[in-house]
Image: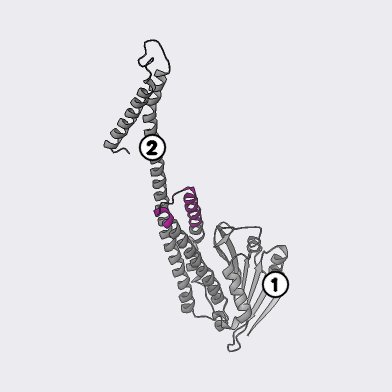
Amino acid sequence: MHKFRQVSPNVQEITIDNENTANEKLVWVNITNAGKKEIEYLRKKFNFNLIHLRASSSKIVSQRPIISEGAHYFFLILHFPVIKDGRLISSEIDFFISHGHLTTLHNGDIGALNDFFKYCKKDGDAILAHKFESSAVLLYEILEKVMLYCFSLLDNSSQKIDKIEERIFAGQVDKNSASDILSLRRDLINFRRIMQNHKNILKKLMEMESSIVPTEDIRKYYKELIEHSKRIWEILENQKEMVDALYQTNESLLNYRLTDVMKTLTIFSVIVFPLTLLAAIFSMRLKGMPLLDNSNGFWIVVTVMIFLSLSMLLFFERKKWL
């Protein structure tokens, strides 16, 4: 049995109660865009540390993940990747975990968390936390859903890599390809920065003790999260290497194309220069110049120019410069 309550526009609460157990009810408080009212609500109702509450304000963004132990609870800050305006950025979730209680604070832009809360609101009896009525298990389920969402982002990155690879090796090398590669490279760097400390935090969470759930079960659940974290990091490493290789390949092809253009222009300049010099000499029309009074002088000069051009082209061809 579960019960939903809308405390305020930004505060929602789900009470999970398994009638088949003698355990206390489990309460999940979900807060979006926490401001002064929401922080004051948590302070009065749950007596959380003021330092932790200030860190949970929507106006303050932590630059690193944090795990800290209060008098009767754990305080946890984790970052997860989200897509906003076509860019991958970091989004923060703050957790207060205590016996029979879990509070989440976020900006509402993590779709996996929003979807899981809606699912609990609709069918809370179907989640694993309902079986144990444990905040540690509920935290595991939330983190699992969000980390699985990370795999979908990695799949999107893989599709982008495949498309860029096809374009490059199809000869479609241009500024757009370079821009797409740099954009993908930036997203992967941000992804790595967001996920790099998750494994250490999860290892510390494995040390949590529960009077409801056996320690072996908690470790088993959080080991799965650590494995997810390792897989995500391995995929990120592979994608980073692939993007670096594509970047170098694209740069090489662009340089080759530029070299080819410069070679063509250089050959054209070398051919035109002697012809221009010859034309400039005969344009002086000084006394004693040959062909000056010859009625066929123009055609003779043109013939000489054509002969010089063909000779130079033949020379370039033999040298395999063309």
Q: Residue at x 44, y 69 (%)?
A: 227
The kind of residue on which mark 2 rests is Thr
Q: How many marks?
A: 2
Residue 153 falls inside the magenta stretch:
no
Q: Residue at x 44, y 62 (%)?
A: 233
Disc on res. 264: 2
Report x, y in % for residue 301: 36, 23
Q: Residue at x 69, y 70 (%)?
A: 11
Instruction: Give the foreground label among 1 and 2.
Output: 2
Residue interval drawn in magenta = 166-189
Quadrant of the rendering where the C terminus is positioned: top left
Side of 237 where 316 appears, left or right: left
The kind of residue on which mark 1 rests is Lys
The residue singled out by tag 1 in the image is: 45
Report x, y in % for residue 19: 61, 88
- Residue neighbourhood size for the residue with mark 2, other residues' Cα within 10 Å, grouped as few (<14), some (14–19), many (≥20): some
Give the CA distance from mark 1 to mark 2: 77 Å
Judging depth in this view, the residue of 209 and 278 nearest the camera is: 278
Judging depth in this view, the residue of 192 and 244 nearest the camera is: 244
Report x, y in % for residue 141: 54, 74
Quadrant of the rendering where the N terminus is positioned: bottom right
